Amino acid sequence: MPTPVSIIPFRPDLGSAFAELNRAWIEQLFRLEDADVHLLRHPEASIIATGGQIFFAMDEKRAVGTAAAIRVSPTTFELGKMAVSPSHQGQGLGERLGRAVIEFARAEGASLVYLETNSALVNAIRLYERLGFVHATRPTPSEYARADVYMEVRL
């Protein structure tokens, strides 16, 4: 019987897993951009220290998924850097990670969580819609060349 996967918050020893999980899917489908490199190299300084959180799906002692709640302002978070290992896709981990980010943002007093993605990621967009995100007009230009979809959920 498979071990249940748990969702846990950031620990410093998981910083490399955050980078590896995200680097794998980004490099497979796109290319790493400067904004990616900064977040993946410095998750504690760029996400945790600024009031955000990174969640991990743990299969025993191995990180098999991750998602970040990136604080943008006192009332706004970005759901970013969501990745699930191919070996664990289709098990609802992305939805659990997304809900963890939304609940964290809500508990922190946020009124908005947004995300940016690419229109080619149809399954990811369906997941975001299940989480309550709706397509909207991007209020500012994106840092990412690949981001051609903007979605948000009001809390």
Image (cartoon, rainbow, N blue to C red):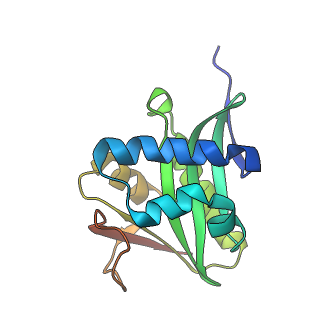
Q: Is residue 67 left or right of residue 104?
A: left
Residue 74 location (% of width, % of height): 65, 84
Name the residue: 36% across, 86% down.
Answer: 139
* Image quadrant assignment for residue 57: top right
Work out whether residue 86 can be spotted: yes
* Image quadrant assignment for residue 45: bottom right
Name the residue: 63% across, 59% down.
Answer: 43
Picture quarter with the C terminus: bottom right
Work out whether residue 104 can be spotted: no
Residue 141 location (% of width, % of height): 33, 81
Q: Is residue 19 above or below residue 89?
A: below
Name the residue: 29% across, 51% down.
Answer: 30
Name the residue: 60% across, 42% down.
Answer: 17
Residue 154 location (% of width, % of height): 51, 76
Residue 3 location (% of width, % of height): 68, 22
Picture quarter with the N terminus: top right
Q: Is residue 14 left or right of residue 129?
A: right
Q: Nearer the viewer, residue 132 or 8?
A: 8
